[in-house]
Amino acid sequence: MKSELSSVKAIVFDTFGTVVDWRSSIADDLSTWGARQGIRAEWLALVDAWRGRYEPQKDRVRKGEIAWTNIDDLHLDALRSLLPEFGLSRLTEDQILHVNRVWHRLNGWPDAVQGLQRLKKRFVIGPLSNGNVALLVNMAKHAGLPWDAIFSCEHFQRYKPHPDTYLGVCRQLYLAPGEVMMCAAHNYDLAAARSLGLKTAFVPRPTEYGPLQTTDLAPEQDWDVVAADLQSLASQMNA
Amino acid sequence: MKSELSSVKAIVFDTFGTVVDWRSSIADDLSTWGARQGIRAEWLALVDAWRGRYEPQKDRVRKGEIAWTNIDDLHLDALRSLLPEFGLSRLTEDQILHVNRVWHRLNGWPDAVQGLQRLKKRFVIGPLSNGNVALLVNMAKHAGLPWDAIFSCEHFQRYKPHPDTYLGVCRQLYLAPGEVMMCAAHNYDLAAARSLGLKTAFVPRPTEYGPLQTTDLAPEQDWDVVAADLQSLASQMNA
């Protein structure tokens, strides 16, 4: 481990894309469910369109155009608006809620659970995610993610990259920013964390958005750690 | 399991006294540490006096006499005021902070870890404690408590038995009060939870305050579950 990282006591993780593979998980879950229900749809295209609404929706909260709204409710709003385009207008309310809850049923990347189990032995670990508490708790149980604590933007009522989120973790853990590391597959997240004094770990996930992904394929700054996956991060952090 | 408990999806626990044995843990920790440091004191008497300040201190926050203050800071304030009486006026600042942090190093009652591990397989489990987040996270790592999420009164900026604490858990988990069970060794905590619609489990800890304890020796209402310990609670909840 680099000597300047010896101060790190806690590591917090972006979840969607960094720890869990939302695109494949959702496509697989809904395809299986749809087949059982006799509902056919272009599920992968739905996932991509759904995720496409994610940043614009959060931007409305970030800019104060709408009051604080949890991700579960932003997802539901976007899902309802997409149903006609995907031939799903006849879903019942229970079916819509089941589909919306698919974000609670995501699977970790193959390295995630073992990497986190190793890191947990040496560090306090938790998500620092735009996902709401219920989503992150249910996701952890579904995927077997061994978090010590859940840090949700719901706690801070701000979406990343607002400073209150990163500094809120430091404050709650009684740690200085330099004692906390942010791990993400997204350069913007790490840039915000670094600007506040947190340590940074980049874990590229070049197929998060599918085989044609063009963003976040490489580090855009000299992050403190660049690791191929969470097992490699554990090794580099001597965990 | 009683049929009216089949709706329960999450169980939250009072920690000090219910899950961890603070009195013995602190006396043992400080006695060992004191012996190494060459510091002699009536440690058990200090613990009892320190804990005696706990409710009056929280009452000052509850009544709005002082602004929201975390338990770590209330503990530190009380500790400083007790040092002269216990012949500890010459502790250094580092030593005082180490002693104050003893509340992060508490051990579970003998049944706690295994009982929680069983309950975790069937339910979302977490503390709902007046302890602050850092204290609860460090305590969980020290004692091996396998929480799914940390619910701290720090999140809600209210101490129990304020309704915001119990209802805050329900809201964050997207659960109705009847889907959440409060487990505690203290009747007042369960009375508050029940009044808001939560299910209740009483686990008496007749030696929490030592062999001469006179309070909370028995259930004061017909709580949904009365269990000798957390292993018994797991059995009664079919976990």
Image (cartoon, coloured by chain):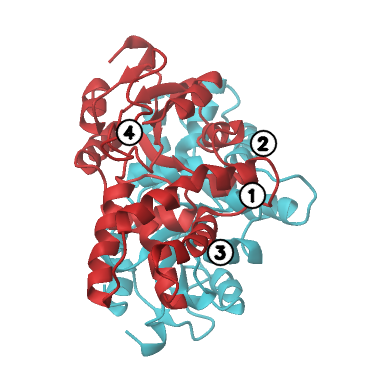
Chain colours: A cyan, B red
Disc 3 and disc 2: Cα gap in Å? 38 Å
Mark 2 packing: few (<14 Cα in 10 Å), some, or many (20+)?
Answer: few
| Farthest residue, direction right | A65
What's the CA distance linking mark 1 and mark 3?
A: 32 Å
**Mark 3 neighbour density, 10 Å: few (under 14) some (14–19) many (20 or more):** some
Instruction: Judge whether B221 appears above or below A114 on screen.
Output: above
Amino acid type for the residue under numbered disc 1: Arg
On whether disc 1 and disc 4 are found on a single subunit, the reply is no
Foreground mark, 4 or 2, reads 4
Residue wearing tag 4: B213
Mark pair 2, 1: CA separation? 10 Å
User: Do labels 2 and 1 touch, CB within 8 Å?
Assistant: yes
**Residue drawn at the location 50% of the way across and 78% of the way down:** A178
Label whose residue precedes the other's in the sequence (1 or 3):
1
Other residues around mark 4 within 10 Å, as few (<14) / some (14–19) / many (≥20)? few
Q: Which label was assigned to residue A53? A: 1
Residue at 44%, 62% in the rendered image? B85
The part of the image, by quadrant, that contains residue A81 is: top right
- The residue that disc 2 covers is A81
Q: Nearer the viewer, residue A186 or B14?
A: B14
Horizontal and vertical percent for residue B105? 32, 58
Q: Name the secondary structure under disc 1.
A: loop
Chain ID, mark 3: A
Could you give the CA–CA distance between mark 4 and mark 3, rounded to whole angstroms?
37 Å
- What is the three-letter code of the residue carrying label 3? Arg
- SS under mark 3: helix
Establish if A181 lies above or below B125: below
Q: Which residue is mark 3?
A: A171
Q: Earlier in the sequence, mark 2 or mark 1?
A: 1
